[in-house]
């Protein structure tokens, strides 16, 4: 008997909200499954090209070879390019664009929503008008116009997606800020002399974080779908393979080779599904009360 | 009431003007202008000629004058000429808008109807098979790229089991008219509408289930049950009426995205609507047409929002009081 714990076993231990959420999350099997899939896909995209070195954009075998009939596991496309190599390299592009677009979406959305919700009045009026305007714009069409007028570089595509997708994040942030700004702890901070910037970013935002984290996670999935749609339409960097582009390129040949479209689509589907599962898991973890839904 | 409607109309008008100003700004900040393109095609020109062309196109005017001219032309219904078809943009759009509206409304209404039914039933039995089915459908529908779903459905229902036509809106070889033409179009409509509807079914079944669950837990439902009303009456007369409100709101708000989704689905099925036209305009770098489609789609969204507002007032009389 050397060191005995000072707290009896039955005493409720103090747990930080983050840790509590992680505990809830850990019990959610489908969310963990989603997390595992995401880890797998990210690993494959980051290290895959070094392990599987078949060039994705060169003819390596007979065009339209079905899966399993050559050394190229998933078969070849209409130009005789290795499908597996395309998927591995395309994952990089899809994930990079999706992630950067989502970051931009969340940054714009939180900034607009925070300012509108915090200041209210005139500022809120103007910012909500702008939000309303962007809600009216058909997002894919607008992104198509932007990408066509400026070149279809990966950066432009990410920016186009970010610029059209932030409105729901802004609305949610605004609602959270309006709710929180009247609370005691914010008034207390203000009374000890905290300025607006501190109140917004250091006091209110951390408390508004849980729902925003869920939205941020889901917006990665939305951005990936968006990027896939644009590159399916041919609006993607001509020098980069992406999953959506592979579907668009192989679409005219579906009668001869369904695999050229099926596999890239499955990759997109699985990635976004995994992200949704994690998003749902986070949602449950942050709002245990809503769990029974 | 009247004043409110007038303000809404004014707001809608302002939104449309804002879309036009945005269009104009985009064209002007994008690299390359029409004169440069023209000079490039001519294989070079003297500085004098370039200056003359600029003044002829009005490009030497200050930006606000150019914007004024642009808005003035739009007000007269002149959206410019397609760079590919020898037709004004408005004529092209008028030709293609019908099929898009047919597709979008069919898909949206089926998704809302079926989604509400699924949501309402699954909310009553939370742990039932149906309830899990709604969860699975909504997850899958949110995660699958709509164009890929379309292609998979083609492989399934047109190639493996040749039930439905792969693409187009009518059979090219049939000179059918009247009822046969309508049946032919409906036959072609099934796959694209199903594709689009599946994606939105995911959303609406989940939304109406969540909304129904919330309403079923409220006090007035308990009261209705306590006073012995039949279950059917409680669910359909008391609960559904309130649970459907978010569905109506989102149907209006989401219309912009529905049109965007239609771009992808129309492209997959070569459905001769605005979406396919938009896709073709990208291939041909036909900027005036693409901008025209963007504007008309925005108009459709604004109109849809106004309609939603009216429907909302009908469904929820409390709104009027505000």
Image (cartoon, coloured by chain):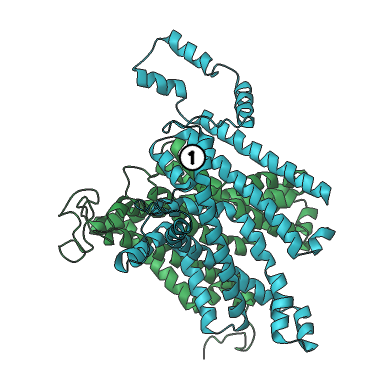
The foreground one among B269 and A208 is: B269
The foreground one among A289 and A239 is: A239
Q: Is residue A277 visible?
A: no
**Residue holding disc 1:** A145
A153 in relation to A232, above or below: above
The foreground one among B210 and A219 is: B210
Local crowd at mark 1 within 10 Å, few (<14), some, or many (≥20)?
Answer: many
The foreground one among A4 and B138 is: B138
A82 in relation to B235, above or below: above
Please tell me how many numbered marks the rendered image carries: 1
Q: Seen in the image, is B254 located left or right of residue A54?
A: right
Expressed as whole percent of the image width and height from the top left, the position of residue B228 reads: 78, 89
Q: Which residue is drawn at 44% across and 67% down?
A: A274
Residue B307 occupies which quadrant of the picture? bottom right
Quarter of the figure with the C terminus of chain A: bottom right
A15 in relation to A223, above or below: below
A51 in relation to A12, above or below: above
Q: Which chain carries label 1?
A: A
Q: Which chain is green?
A: A
Expressed as whole percent of the image width and height from the top left, the position of residue B259 reads: 53, 51
Q: Seen in the image, is A116 located left or right of residue A165?
A: right
Expressed as whole percent of the image width and height from the top left, the position of residue B96 reads: 49, 45
Residue found farthest to the bottom: A1
Residue found farthest to the top: B48
Q: The cyan chain is which one?
A: B
Q: Which residue is drawn at 64% across and 25% down?
A: B68
Q: Which residue is drawn at 62% across and 59% down?
A: B251
Helix, strand or loop status at disc 1: helix
Q: Can residue B165 be seen in this view?
A: yes
Expressed as whole percent of the image width and height from the top left, the position of residue A87 reads: 30, 57
């Amino acid at each position: 008997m050397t060191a005995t714990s000072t707290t009896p076993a039955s005493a409720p231990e103090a747990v930080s909200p983050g840790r509590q959420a992680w505990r809830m999350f850990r019990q959610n099997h489908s969310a963990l499954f989603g997390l595992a899939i995401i880890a797998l896909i990210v690993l494959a995209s980051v290290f895959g090209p070094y392990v599987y070195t078949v060039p994705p954009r060169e003819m390596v075998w007979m065009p339209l070879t079905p899966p399993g009939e050559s050394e190229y596991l998933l078969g070849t496309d209409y130009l005789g390019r290795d499908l597996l190599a395309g998927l591995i390299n395309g994952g990089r592009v899809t994930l990079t664009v999706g992630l950067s677009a989502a970051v931009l979406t969340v940054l714009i959305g939180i900034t607009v929503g925070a300012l509108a919700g915090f200041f209210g009045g005139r500022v809120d009026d103007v910012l909500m008008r702008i939000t309303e305007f962007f809600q009216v714009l058909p997002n894919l069409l607008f992104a198509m116009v932007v990408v066509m007028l400026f070149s279809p570089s990966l950066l432009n595509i990410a920016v186009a997606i970010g610029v059209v997708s932030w409105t729901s994040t802004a609305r949610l942030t605004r609602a959270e800020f309006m709710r929180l700004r009247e609370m005691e702890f914010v008034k207390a901070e203000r009374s000890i002399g905290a300025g607006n910037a501190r109140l917004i970013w250091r006091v209110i935002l951390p408390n508004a974080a849980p729902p925003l984290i869920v939205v941020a996670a889901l917006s990665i999935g939305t951005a990936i779908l968006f990027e896939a749609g644009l590159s399916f339409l041919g609006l993607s960097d001509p020098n980069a393979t992406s999953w959506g582009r592979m579907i668009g390129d192989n679409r005219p040949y579906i009668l001869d080779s369904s695999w050229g479209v099926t596999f890239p689509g499955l990759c997109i589907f699985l990635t976004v599904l995994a992200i949704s599962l994690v998003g749902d898991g986070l949602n449950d973890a942050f709002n245990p009360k809503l769990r029974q839904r | 009431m009247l004043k409110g409607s007038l303000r809404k109309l004014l707001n809608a008008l302002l939104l449309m003007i804002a879309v036009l100003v945005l269009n104009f700004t985009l064209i002007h900040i994008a690299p390359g202008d029409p004169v440069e393109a023209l000079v490039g095609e001519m294989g070079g020109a003297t500085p004098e000629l370039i200056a003359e062309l600029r003044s002829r196109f009005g490009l030497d005017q200050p930006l606000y004058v150019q914007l004024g001219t642009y808005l003035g032309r739009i007000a007269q219904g002149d959206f410019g000429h397609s760079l590919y078809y020898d037709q004004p943009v408005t004529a092209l759009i008028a030709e293609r808008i019908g099929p898009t509206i047919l597709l979008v409304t069919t898909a949206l209404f089926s998704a809302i109807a079926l989604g509400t039914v699924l949501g309402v039933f699954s909310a009553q039995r939370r742990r039932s098979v149906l309830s899990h089915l709604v969860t699975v459908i909504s997850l899958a529908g949110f995660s699958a790229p709509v164009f890929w779903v379309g292609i998979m459905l083609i492989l399934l229902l047109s190639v493996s089991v040749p039930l439905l036509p792969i693409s187009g809106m009518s059979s090219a070889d049939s000179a059918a008219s009247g009822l046969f033409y309508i049946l032919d179009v409906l036959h072609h409509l099934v796959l694209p509408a199903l594709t689009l509807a599946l994606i939105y079914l995911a959303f609406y079944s989940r939304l109406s289930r969540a909304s129904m669950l919330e309403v079923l837990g409220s006090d007035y439902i308990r009261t209705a049950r306590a006073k012995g009303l039949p279950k059917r009456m409680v669910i359909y007369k008391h609960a559904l009426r309130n649970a459907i409100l978010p569905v109506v709101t989102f149907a209006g708000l989401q219309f912009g995205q529905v049109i965007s989704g239609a771009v992808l689905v129309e492209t997959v099925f070569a459905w001769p609507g605005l979406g396919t036209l938009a896709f073709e305009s990208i291939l041909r770098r036909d900027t005036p047409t693409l901008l025209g489609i963007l504007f008309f789609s925005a108009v459709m969204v604004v109109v849809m929002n106004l309609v939603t507002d009216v429907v909302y007032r009908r469904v929820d009389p409390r709104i009027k009081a505000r």
